[in-house]
């Protein structure tokens, strides 16, 4: 009995210290003994104002972080009496910072300085800004330096965001389902709002502020008009009160037909005076409830959604109507450029360009076009969208997907930092060499008055927020790159691993290596060599390259790979759809020329015979099969690496990741086998030497169905 009692006690202690991922990267655990004495000397006390809600958030976060990281509770000083003080504030809120006369010009509201300084002859660390929100961002940066053991005795950090709007788009429905969500129900418990404010809302705001995200669209782009009714505006206002101290503004997706559905009108024509008046009144009501409301996100005339084209009007007509209603309140319209006509236009990749480029310069100043990173739909790899650089008189806002709709949902380890970096650093040549996508969206290339980046959120009600431990890294890297589009994906991964798991080199190096290779692995076992959209129709779970027969061709994988007995790939050169011509001439020439096109985009732009000779000397068929196998091998290697870290990462999170990697390996093999079996049925080529046959006949893979795959609410 005594022995059993001891075991039970031990298990309860272990359970109390178990980690489930709730803390995200704000995991303030004691730092290594090698740095603790020096860091304690640098952070003996905190002097920070607490008069406003944002000031209190900054002070409380700093005290929470220091207590956890330094294994002690630094007392708050009433004055700087000794070295080792951390002094936080603005010239208006802190006499000490006012006295230092720091160079805060050019930092705006959100920028900040972190400096080593002398105050009354004593060493101090100063976090200074022009505005309270800047000090909050600075506090989170200082804590990151502590967490990652990068704090030094000489600090000279100067930061300001490159993009003005850094927004999470929640595809959350009012019934708490989440379209393309793989982390449980919606975070927003609409039924209990506005009276019950779940503490998770504050932790969500903290996490976003820590990486510089300053906006949240609460509801799905496939919006319900009910979101704009007084009942739901009161709920949104309650969430806005929670987010406000953390610098986060609330936005809503608006259904274009709302004047008819909840307003009693017979039309939603954007040029109709009654419709325009209805939107002005509705927007005024929103601002009465939410004085700092950010604006509206709109999906119109896409995938069956209503829009201005229903009335013979243009996207500019629709966006400008809403922009005029928002302008007196300093709100913005984020008008999505993800559109495609119901009729088959021959190449879906061309449709957004064809619809929007003729409208360049016709949008109001407070309208941003929200453009997906690629011309199709968040595929494992796409070339950058040709709209970037093609609309010099219109602000373009990047839209990335953080939730992994086409990348294995929550169970596949796919770090999206390399995908984001690949897109942002792509050169559009719109104004010559160096016209990167990052320079398009930050406004520096075309001097746009407003800039932004949106990410389709991957958070939900799961305890670990994102459905898996590693999907937290995609939320994290999105925020870091929205703040600085030229941030290095590897460095961001290094910070995240140190903050989330461990500072130990024997953990950091292999885990960062896994993360940096993971996206390329997924491309290889899903859509290698420029293939795209091979996922099962609708749910997008698993391979279905044979899928055909939908209501419209561009819903089917066969539309995108165009494989037959002769070859494979989508010809987008002048001999095909000529989508390549939508890019600037130097880019178009490179993509169209088989001797220059990067192999990663080969089959995106070219239809080639199975025996086409690759630069390696292999046939296309052999290279395709090899890429599929390489993707599987990379997952096996990731799984072995993670297994080797047992005992160096807490058991609960290590076990969860290990289980998910096992799922990923099995599903990567499924992808490989199903695609190889299907493409071999067309190519009629033998498998290359050393490549194993698929585990099952093709009929087995085509017979599989997934009517209840998660995240598909359509």
Image (cartoon, rainbow, N blue to C red):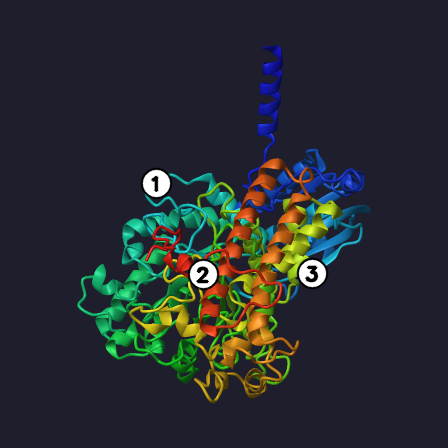
Q: At x 78% / y 50%, what residue is drawn?
A: 152
Left or right: 355 as drawn, with respect to 75: left
- Of the pair 3 and 566, the residue shown nearer to us: 566
SS label for mark 1? loop
SS label for mark 2? loop
Give the percent coordinates (x, y) of residue 540: 42, 59
| Furthest residue toward top | 1
Question: Pointer 2: what residue?
Answer: 543
- N-terminal of the pair, mark 1 or mark 3, is 3
Give the percent coordinates (x, y) of residue 291: 40, 56
SS label for mark 3? strand
Judge the density around disc 2: few (<14), some (14-19), many (≥20) Cα neighbours within 10 Å: many
Image: 650 above or below 237: above
Camera-side mark, 3 or 2: 2
Camera-side mark, 1 or 3: 1
Image: 366 above or below 232: below
| Mark 3 to mark 2 CA distance (whole Å) | 47 Å
- Of the pair 311 and 644, the residue shown nearer to us: 644
- Of the pair 603 and 237, the residue shown nearer to us: 603
Give the percent coordinates (x, y) of residue 349: 43, 76
Tag 1 near tag 3, CB within 8 Å: no
Image: 464 above or below 247: above
Question: Pointer 3: what residue?
Answer: 158
Give the percent coordinates (x, y) of residue 315: 35, 76
- N-terminal of the pair, mark 3 or mark 2, is 3
Q: At x 43% / y 57%, what residue is drawn?
A: 541
Q: At x 41% / y 48%, what residue is drawn?
A: 239
Badge number at residue 192: 1
| Mark 1 to mark 3 CA distance (whole Å) | 42 Å
């Amino acid at each position: 009995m005594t022995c059993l009692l001891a075991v039970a006690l031990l298990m309860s202690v272990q359970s109390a210290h178990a980690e489930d991922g709730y803390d995200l990267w704000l995991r303030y655990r004691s730092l290594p003994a090698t740095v603790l004495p020096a860091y304690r000397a640098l952070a003996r006390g905190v002097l920070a104002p607490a008069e406003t809600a944002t000031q209190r958030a900054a002070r409380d976060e700093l005290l929470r972080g220091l207590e956890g990281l330094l294994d002690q509770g630094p007392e708050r000083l009433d004055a700087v009496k000794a070295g080792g003080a951390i002094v936080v504030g603005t010239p208006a809120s802190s006499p000490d910072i006012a006295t230092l006369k720091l160079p805060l010009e050019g930092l705006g509201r959100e920028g900040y300085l972190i400096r080593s300084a002398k105050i009354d002859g004593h060493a101090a660390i100063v976090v200074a800004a022009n505005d309270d929100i800047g000090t909050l961002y600075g506090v989170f940066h200082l804590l990151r330096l502590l967490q990652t053991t990068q704090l030094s005795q000489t600090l000279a950090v100067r930061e300001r965001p490159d993009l003005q709007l850094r927004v999470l788009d929640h595809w959350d429905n009012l019934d708490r389902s989440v379209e393309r969500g793989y982390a449980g129900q919606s975070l927003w418990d609409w039924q209990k709002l506005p009276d019950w404010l779940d503490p998770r809302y504050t932790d969500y705001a903290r996490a976003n502020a820590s990486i510089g995200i300053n906006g949240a669209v609460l509801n799905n782009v496939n919006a319900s008009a009910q979101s704009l009714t007084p009942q739901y505006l009161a709920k949104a206002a309650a969430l806005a009160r929670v987010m406000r101290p953390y610098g986060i503004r609330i936005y809503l997706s608006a259904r274009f037909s709302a004047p008819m559905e909840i307003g009693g009108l017979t039309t939603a024509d954007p040029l109709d005076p009654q419709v325009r008046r209805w939107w002005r009144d509705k927007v005024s009501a929103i601002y009465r409830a939410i004085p700092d409301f950010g604006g509206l996100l709109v999906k119109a005339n896409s995938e069956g959604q209503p829009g201005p084209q229903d009335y013979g009007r243009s996207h500019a007509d629709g966006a400008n109507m809403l922009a005029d209603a928002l302008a007196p309140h300093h709100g913005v319209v984020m008008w999505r450029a993800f559109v495609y006509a119901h009729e088959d236009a021959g190449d879906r990749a061309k449709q957004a360009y064809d619809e929007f480029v003729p409208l360049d310069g016709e949008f109001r100043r407070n309208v941003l076009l929200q453009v997906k990173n690629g011309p199709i739909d968040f595929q494992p790899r796409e070339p950058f969208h040709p709209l970037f650089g093609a609309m010099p008189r219109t602000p373009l806002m990047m839209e990335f997907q953080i939730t992994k709709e086409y990348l294995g949902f929550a169970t596949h380890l796919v770090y999206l930092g390399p995908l984001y970096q690949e897109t942002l650093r792509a050169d559009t040549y719109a104004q010559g060499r160096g016209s990167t996508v990052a320079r398009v969206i930050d406004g520096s290339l075309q001097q746009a008055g407003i800039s932004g980046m949106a990410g389709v959120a991957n958070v939900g009600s799961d305890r670990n927020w994102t459905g898996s431990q590693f999907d937290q890294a995609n939320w994290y890297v999105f925020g870091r790159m929205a703040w600085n589009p030229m941030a290095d994906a590897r460095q961001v991964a290094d910070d995240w691993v140190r903050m989330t798991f461990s500072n130990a080199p024997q953990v950091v190096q292999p885990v960062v290596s896994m993360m940096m290779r993971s996206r390329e692995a997924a491309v290889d076992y899903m859509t290698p060599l420029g293939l795209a959209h091979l996922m099962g129709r609708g749910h997008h779970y698993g391979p279905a390259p044979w899928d055909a027969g939908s209501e419209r061709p561009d819903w089917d994988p066969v539309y995108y790979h165009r494989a037959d007995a002769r070859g494979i790939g989508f010809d987008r050169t002048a001999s095909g759809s000529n989508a390549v011509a939508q890019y600037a001439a130097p880019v178009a020439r490179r993509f169209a020329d088989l001797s220059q096109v990067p192999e990663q985009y080969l089959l995106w732009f070219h239809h080639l015979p199975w025996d086409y000779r690759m630069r390696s000397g292999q046939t296309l068929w052999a290279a395709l099969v090899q890429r599929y196998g390489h993707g599987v091998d990379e997952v096996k290697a990731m799984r072995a690496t993670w297994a080797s870290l047992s005992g160096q990462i807490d058991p609960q999170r290590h076990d969860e990741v290990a289980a998910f990697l096992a799922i990923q390996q099995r599903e990567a093999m499924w992808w490989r086998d199903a695609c190889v079996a299907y493409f071999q049925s067309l190519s009629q080529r033998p498998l290359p030497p050393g490549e194993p046959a698929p585990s099952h006949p093709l009929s087995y893979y085509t017979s599989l169905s997934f009517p209840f795959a998660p995240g598909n609410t359509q």
